[in-house]
Image (cartoon, grey):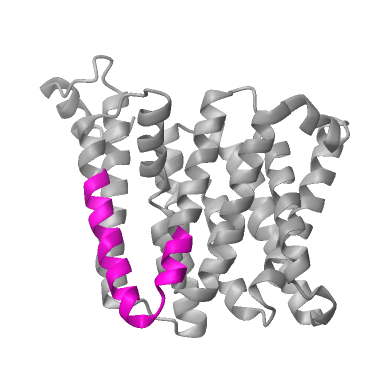
Amino acid sequence: MACAAVCWSSGGLIARLVSTSPWTTSLWRSLFASLFLTVVLWIVRGRNIVAQWRTGGLPVVVAATCMALASTCFILSLAHTSVANTLLLMSTGPYVTALLGWLLLRERVAPRTWLTMAVALAGAVVMVSNSYGRGAMVGDLLAVVMATSFAVATVVVRRHPEIQMAPAAALATALTALVALPLAAPIETAPRDLALLAFFGVGQFGAGFLLFMAGARLIPAAESSLIGMLETVLGPLWVWLVLSERPATATLTGGALILAALVANTLIDRLTATCPSGGWSRRALLSRFRRGGRQ
């Protein structure tokens, strides 16, 4: 999971290092990612990728379309706002998922989740209000659309658990490349940029996705979410260290609120998971502290 987060965190830096247009960046990234995932799936499963898409049916197409929209918005958002704003606003996705699950699937949302959602929303408002004065509002709104699109894809997968995520991701990258093709200028891509874009697709997206899928099967969901937050922290850090893109004060303030809400909610999930009744018994808490918080 940590390796997946490190792979994903390189996206903002690569987007800053290449000189290609956002649409060209999106095209090459998606094309390399789609080819990589298709080859891996063919080797592992021994089946044609198109056959795997047909097996999934319409739900796979819907989920992949939402993921493709999110991927496109990710690249366009990076072109119009800071890396920190993009990643921090993207991290609100779990709350959008919870809200959509409550509205569409009638899933119960715990009171503490509503509270942390309000805190995260306050952080997002602080960040976006600062972007209005800097002319970065479009980028922030694209990041919100990206988070919402991923949330919709997640809800679709919850509604249709038979969906296999790897074929869906391969289809999503293919759709992203198809959308970007008419607006891109791939012939004008320099060799240096092409090498970076190959890593963007294969390393940042493809390898990151496969590592995430492997790690998610080995550790609890709460720990997966917590480790996955490394992307939100490391992404702006790489750009700050390499290119001196320092996050604005409002970004740091709003981002701190969002991350605090996410961490608090995730840690509470992990604690309550050890209590069969979901309660906060004194004995259970004392036991955890005596063991140094280890399960």
Q: Which of the two residues, 159 or 213, is positioned nearer the viewer here?
A: 159
Q: Residue at x 58, y 23 (%)?
A: 161
Drawn side of residue 268 relative to residue 181, left or right: left
Report whether residue 198 is seen. no
Q: Residue at 49%, 73% (x, y): give it.
A: 238
- The part of the chain drawn in magenta is 117-143
- Asked if the magenta segment contains residue 24, the reply would be no
Q: Determine the main secondary structure of the stretch shown in magenta.
A: helix
Q: Residue furthest front?
A: 182
Report x, y in % for residue 250.
Answer: 26, 72
Residue 242 vertical placement versus 142 (above, below): below
Residue 166 quadrant? top right
In the image, is 157 to the left or to the right of 175?
left
Q: Nearer the viewer, residue 268 or 80?
A: 80
Residue at image coords 14%, 21%? 281
**Nearer to the camera, 47 or 133:** 133
Where residue 55 sits: x, y (%)?
A: 77, 25
Q: Quadrant of the C terminus?
A: top left
The answer to whether residue 190 is above or below residue 32 is below
Give the farthest residue toward the left. Answer: 282
Look at the picture and state if 66 lies above or below 157: below
Quarter-wise, where is residue 288 in the image? Answer: top left
Tell me if residue 121 is in the magenta stretch.
Answer: yes
Measured as percent of width and height from the top left, residue 231 is found at 47, 58
Say above or below: 72 vs 52: below
Q: Is residue 34 something that shows in the picture? A: yes
Left or right: 157 as drawn, with respect to 245:
right
Q: How many marks?
A: 0
